[in-house]
Each structure stands twice: as C-alpha cells, then as structure tokens.
Image: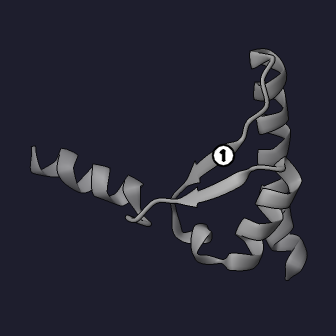
Amino acid sequence: MRALLEGPCLRSAEVVEAMSKDMNAPVTSMAVDGGMTVNNLMMQTQSDLIDAKIVRKQEKEITAMGAAIAAGI
C-alpha cells in the first residue's frame, strides 16, 4: 500500500527537481489539490522528498469545480 502512495510522490519530486534546476532556485512550497491530497502520509512523504512546505487548497477538487463552471458557461 505504501508503495502506491510513494510512487506519485517520487515522480512529482523528479519534476520539482527539474523545475528547480531550470529556475536556478529551490522550490520552497508546493500548492496541492485533488483527492490524493487528503492522505496525510502521502503529503508528508511529498514534503520530505522535495524538502518543501505542502500547502493544501481549501477546495480539494479544483478540477471538478473548473469542469462544473465550464459546463455552466
């Protein structure tokens, strides 16, 4: 089970590392949303891997909200 949570964290850490190298600056915080962000172990793992603060959005499902707004328009 833990490996299922760590997999996306490791992939995200690779992307964040590449972004950090491209910017020549460290990433100090990461804003997250989506269903997986409610898992505290996953968010702590992500924070540890990228050595940055994780900031959860108040609205967990931003994508669904955007789709609903687009459908309403």
Residue 58 appears at what percent x and percent y?
40, 65
Residue reaching furthest bottom?
Answer: 1
- Side of 46 where 55 appears, left or right: left
Colour mode? Answer: one colour
Badge 1 crowding class, 10 Å Cα cut-off, few under 14, some 14 to 19, many 20 or more, is few
Q: From the image, which quarter does the N terminus lie in?
A: bottom right
Q: Is residue 11 visible?
A: no
Numbered circles on residues, count: 1
Residue occupying image coordinates x 78% and y 23%: 25
- Looking at the image, is 46 positioned above or below residue 11? below
Q: Is residue 71 visible in the rendered structure shown here?
A: yes
In the displayed structure, would residue 47 be above or below residue 41?
A: above
For image coordinates 85% across by 59% down, the residue present is: 48
Q: Residue at x 87, y 78 (%)?
A: 2
Query: 1 above or below 26?
Result: below
The residue that label 1 is drawn on is 29
Where residue 45 sits in the image (x, y, percent)? 82, 66
| Residue 6: quadrant of the picture | bottom right
- Circle 1 SS class: strand
List the single residue furthest toward the left. 73
Residue 37 lies left or right of residue 6; in this view the side is: left
Residue 27, horizontal then vertical, whole percent: 73, 36
Q: Is residue 18 above or below residue 68?
A: above
- Considering depth in this image, is 63 or 16 the residue closer to the camera? 16
Q: Quadrant of the C terminus?
A: top left
Q: Nearer the viewer, residue 34 or 41?
A: 41
Q: Position of residue 64 (x, y in %)?
A: 35, 59
